Each structure stands twice: as C-alpha cells, then as structure tokens.
C-alpha cells in the first residue's frame, strides 16, 4: 500500500531528510521517497492512515497542497 502527497516548502536535501525521518516514526511506514523538484512524497507501508501522514507532514512544515 502507498500514499502520495504533493507538499509545499521542499527546497533541499535537508527538507527531504526531515520528511523521511519524520514520517519514519509513523506506525506502518516502511519507506518514504521525496522528489525535491516536484514536492511529491510517496509513502509505502502497511495499514497507512492518510490523515495521520498528512497531519505529520504539516507539523513538520510541509503541508499538503490544495
């Protein structure tokens, strides 16, 4: 199972690392891929809660685009 997000404020490798590290703490997350150029974040794992992932992204400073 995977979830894909388009987020704001991804500007560098440090941003991508912050997203990977922050989402890795969420239950069920197995991997996180971040495309800096497009701001896309793909999260793979089992029993993922999209709402929880979106909330975590926002709390890290990377809110989902409308």
Image (tube, grey):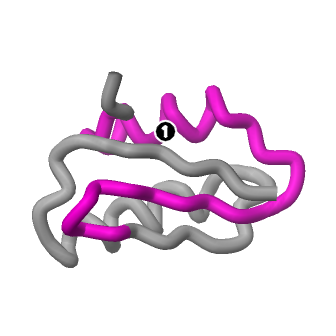
Q: Position of residue 54 (x, y in %)?
A: 51, 34
Whether residue 19 sits left or right of residue 16 in the image: it is right
Q: Which residue is mark 1?
A: 56
Q: Position of residue 41 (x, y in %)?
A: 45, 58
- At which x and y percent is residue 9? 16, 47
Q: Quadrant of residue 63?
A: top left
**Residue located 37% across and 33% down the image:** 64
| Side of 35 where 30 appears, left or right | right
- Decide whether residue 55 is among the magenta residues: yes
Start-end of magenta stretch? 35-63
Q: Residue at x 73, y 71 (%)?
A: 30
- Residue 18 location in percent, x, y? 33, 64
Residue 15 found in image quarter: bottom left
Position of the N terminus by quadrant: bottom right
Q: Is residue 62 magenta?
A: yes
Residue shown at 65%/49% (left/top)?
3
């Amino acid at each position: 199972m995977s979830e894909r997000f388009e987020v704001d404020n991804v500007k560098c490798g440090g941003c991508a690392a912050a997203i990977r590290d922050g989402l890795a703490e969420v239950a069920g997350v197995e991997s996180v891929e971040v495309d800096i150029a497009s701001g896309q974040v793909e999260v793979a794992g089992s029993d993922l809660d999209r709402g929880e992932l979106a909330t975590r992204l926002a709390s890290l400073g990377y809110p989902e685009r409308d």
